Structures are given as structure tokens and as C-alpha cells.
Image (spheres, rainbow, N blue to C red):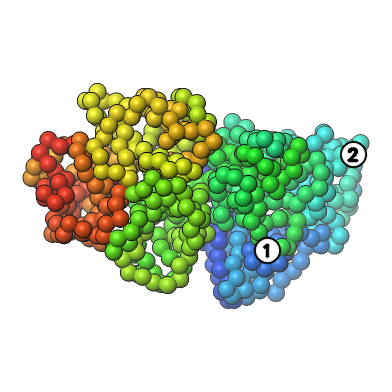
Amino acid sequence: MSTRVRQALQGAAGAAGGESLNVEDVFSTYLYTGTGSSQTITNNLDLSGEGGLVWTKSRDLGLGHILYDSERSGKLSTNEATSEGSDSFSFSMSNSGYSFNTGSSAFNQSGNDYVSWTFRKAPKFFDVVTYTGDGNSTKVLSHNLGTTVGSVIIKDLDNNSQNWQVFHRSMSGTPNYSIMNLNTTAAVTTVGVQLWDQSNTTFTVYSNTGQNVSGRNYVAYLFAHNDGDGEFGPTGDQDIIKCGSFTVNSSGWSVDLGFEPQWVMIKKASGTSDWGVVDNMRSWDTLSGTGDNATQLRANLSNAENRETYPRITSTGFNHEGAAGWLSSGAEYIYIAIRRGPMAVPESATDVFGVKDRYSEGSLPTWQSGFVTDMAMRKRTSGSDSYIYTRLTQGKELAANATSIEATTGNSSFDYMTGWGDIASTSSGDFGWNWRRAPNFFDVVAYTGNGNSGRNINHNLGVAPEMMWIKCRSNTDNWNVYHKDIDVHSDNAPETDVIYLNRNNAASEAGINTFQNTAPTDSVFTVGQASHVNGSGRTYIAYLFATLNGVSKVGGYTGNGTNQTIDCGFTNGARFVLLRRTDFFGDWTVYDSERGIVAGNDPYLSLNSTNAEDVYGATDTIDPQSSGFIVNQVSTNNLNVNNASYIFYAIA
């Protein structure tokens, strides 16, 4: 079966409810450090079977962008008009990524950092087409997007001074009569003759020197535009790529993509500007204010990356509140945006959660989870604040045991493929619990309050969250916790109750101004107008947790005074357990397999205090059990008092 037939069948299967492609199957941002010798990049994209494009850039050296694709053997550079070049080294694509055998500074100079963006060919996402010009007034070319083209980028492979030509469906004027150059800052040029034409199966180039000179060879990179007709994700009906435009308003503006982006390329259409490229792996955060918030590369320049004030990520797109920053107020911009992954529901807890002691690593990243990490909690066994860090707010930390505002911190980079933190030295007893955002498991949402009652906040958990932690980042306030098994008045309405992460008080009524007496859904959670969850102009962050069969469990139990098994549906026990009594005073106690969940005394830490590990003395409050864990009543911790109410969160 051919690649294109298989892709078409996968798309059809997704639309019919079968297996379909996810964004992580067709796109990857991959960060690596040069070794000076052969290196293999495993991004789990099938390039040898399906084909695609690898776009690489040195991050800290002023070297050009390097592009290889499956249809050619030579290299190209987006920041140059030069023709296709040849290399003396080997670059090869595999069914799980690509490899090269060079120490060239462009790819792999020892000790320097690089980023690669890989686009796998797939219907309704991306295609690569090569052709030879015939010099005719029109030339019709086939493509395999299966939908109207959102943007085309073409390069003359033989001409050493021919600019890259760009079509975009949202360019100013009449798009089919307009052109831009990827390697220059020039604005859109609109001419009196047609330059482009597109359909679901073809695109047409006209008698333009950059598109159809007789005998010259060309490559075209085609990007789809999903407009409610995407065929991706578990349900086979989700969008993953958008090609659109927006106009900057200095008082604030937003772009609704219908998804949270992970990669965006932006260019001013109404004037000159660079082609700015950002991604969520190299630090693109949601921090408010007018400060720099994104690490940007420019497709038309060889410059090293730099920090810019850029549009900020939201759960449904990107926006800007206040000053335009890198953008120009009143100007029109075009963009290509790709959805954040993963879209697939995780099947193994080790793919999305891990715990590590800093001492056990000794190399960067400091806390090596083995996966892309999006949120981490950190606490020292000798006693410290319980710190929380996220990819969305890099360079900032919150203390789970305090009401304090978000603080600036160093050494908390998420700029790694396998963990977080950039403290080079080792230190025992400095633990990090690490989460990856994934459907049905865990999500993080940053938002700015508007003071309105009954406000819905979009999220991407994919199911109704069963536990939420909400904290005001800009002002001192409590951590407000929603949990499905808190029931203060025995009314089966957890949305009317609240408990605080930073305190040991019993659960209490939340009041309508907290969660608006409204249960969260699979797409939104609701907040009232109270300043601790939605004060006008204040900034917030919310952590959303859910039960995922065999991976995680959000639940509750009633104490029996002796011991009892808490069945989480696991097969090899729990690696992480968070426990809290809700009808009386109690700490948020944390147990994990790294420090020991054993049939004996168990070390624990308290999230709501600065206390050291085992502050009350080691006690046997928890034991291992294959389906989850066992709680024992011990008076120092009181985690199984007869008829008392408890909540927990466990990860396999």
C-alpha cells in the first residue's frame, strides 16, 4: 500500500471514529546540543515512510537556517536567496526521525544548542512538491493535502539569487495576486496579474520568474488550513493547523485558533518586518506585562535567538494585552500556527509523571523525568517552601505553602526534551515531582481576571477536571482547591465547597463568587467575581487533574480507624500519593516511591508547610498495594480516623 493511500485511509478512519493521526505524529520541535560527531534525532516521526521537511537552526550561533526534505538531496536556507547546496556529509531520514554524521557548526558543533522543526507529510497538514518549470503562462501541479492550501512557500533550486516566494490565504489585498519573500522583510506585493491558484488537489503557478522558468527545478512546501474540517485527534475531527491574519490593537487583541498553539510563524503583511518564529519548547510563556516573553528566531535572518515581547499563548490561541511589543500597533500580520500536543491519551504513567532527587542526576536538565515536562513541584527534605514551576511561566515560581505572589527565580528552565532545571551541581534531598500536560490526565491554564461573575475559562484537559488548584499570581491570596469528593453539607455539590492548598483548615463553603456553584466540564471551568479567582486585571494559574484509567486517580474515602486498601485501578501500585483530611485540620501529605512507599515507616512531606521530611517522626501511615495503596491510622498523621473524610490524588 502506498504512503498516500495509507494516509488517506487513516484520515477516513479518523472521521469514522477509528484511529487517526495526532499532531505529535506529524510535527515536532526538538532541542538538542551539538556533539561534534554523528547524532541521531529521535522525534518519533516517520520520515522515511511518509516524507517531510526538517528545518534546523543554531540557537546560539549566527548561522543560517538549514532545510532538508524527503524529495531532494541538497540543503536550502530560508535566510538566503541562494540555490540548493550540496554537502559532503550524510543526512538521512528514518521511520522515527533523522540522523547526520557531521560536526558542522550548522548542525552539530560540540556544546552549542540547536532546534529542529520537523513537518511530516500528511493530508490536511503538510506536503512537499518538487517540479520543473515549463515557462508557460500557467502550470498546474498536484498536491496531497486534500483541502485548500493555506500557504505555499516556493524556492527556485537552480537560481542563486531568486527570492523565496510565499503565498498566504490571508495576505492583504487579493491573495492570489499577492506575494511575499521568506528571505526578506518586504511587505506584501500585489500585482495586476494572477500569481497563484489553489484547490483541494492542485495549485497553479503562473509565468513568474520565481515559480515557473523553463527548465528550472523548484520545491514547494504546502501548509493546510483547517477550518473546522480537520481530521486529527482521538475523535478524528480536530484541527491542528491554521493560516490566518490579525490586526494589532495597542489596547489588546486576541486570535482564536480553537486550540493552544505550540509553534507560530508571524510576518507583517502591511509593512516591513522579520518573519518571527516561536515555539513552546524554547520558552514562550504567558507572563503578563510588557516584558519579553518569547525566545524568537527569524526565518529571514541567521541571527541567534533572542527574547522579545511577543503575543502570549492562551488555551485557544494567542493574544496581547497592552503594548504591541515586537509587533506594530495598527498593522496587519499573517501567521501559520500549529496545535500543541500531545493529543493522544497517555497509556503509561511513566510517560507523563516522574519523581527525581537532584542528587541522582549530576547533569542537565537537573531533574530528568525522561519526557517533556510542563509542571514541576520541588521541595527539600531538610525543609523548604513547596515550590511550583511551569513551562507557561518560565522564570517564575509559586510557593504552594504560602499566599505570596509569583516570584522571579533562576535555574528553572523547561528548555529540555527530558526534564527541567539548569542547576549543574548535585545536592541530595532536593526532590522534583514532574508532570506532562496530556489529555485526560493533567492540564495547566494561565488567565487574566476580568471581575465578571460566572466567567468560563477554557481548558484542554479533554474531560471534566476532578481536582483544580487556582492561585492568583499577581496578588497575595490563598490557593483555592476544588475536588470532586469534598462534600461539606452532604449535598453532592463539590462546586459549592473549597479547601486551601496552603492551609490545614477543614473544607468550607466556597460561596458563589469562587466556583459560581458550577461544576467544571470537559472544556471549561467556571469562576465567580471574587478577587482570589477572577479579580479584574489580576493574573492567575490553574492546575487541572483527572482520573485516567491505570495512570492516575482522583478520589476520596471515609476513614475506618484501622487500615484499608484504596483501590485506584492500578496494577503495580502508586508511585505518588497526595492525602488530605477535609472535615478537620490536616496537612497535604505527599508520599512517593523514590523516597519510599514501603511496608514499614514511610517518609512524607507536607505541601502546606516548610517542615522537613518526617517532622513528626517516621510512621507507618501508608503501605504499598498493587491496585493503589493502603492507609493505616497513626495518630501523628491521622490519615484514617474512623468516619473522617479524606481526599487523595494518586499516580501509578
- From where the camera sits, is residue 433 visible? no
Can you say whether 538 is above or below 600 in the image? above
Quarter-of-image position of residue 79:
bottom right
Report whether 163 appears left or right of 233.
right
Q: Which label number is shown at residue 367?
A: none
Question: In the rendered image, which quarter is residue 86 located in?
Answer: bottom right
Q: Residue at x 32, y 61 (%)?
A: 380
Residue 516 in the image: state x and y as whole percent: 40, 25
- Residue at 25 percent across and 40 percent down: it is 505
Query: Mark 2 belongs to which amino acid?
Result: Val
Quick one: SS at disc 1?
loop
Q: Secondary structure at mark 2?
A: loop
Image side of residue 206 versus residue 584, left or right: right
Depth check: 155 or 639 in front? 639
State the residue in front, 555 or 7.
Answer: 555
Image disc number at residue 304: 1
Up-down relation of residue 489 to residue 475 (above or below): above
Mark 1 and mark 2: Cα distance apart in space: 34 Å
Q: Earlier in the sequence, mark 1 or mark 2?
A: 2
Residue 421 on image: x %, y %: 46, 62
In the foreground, 217 or 617: 617
Q: Nearer the viewer, mark 1 or mark 2?
A: 1
The location of residue 301, given as percent across then percent down, is 75, 59
Asked if residue 76 is positioned above or below residue 254 in the image, the reply reads below
Report the amino acid beneath label 1. Answer: Ala
| Number of dots carrying numbers | 2
Q: Residue at coordinates 18% horizontally, 43% vertically from top-left?
A: 566
Would you say residue 295 is visible in this rendering? yes
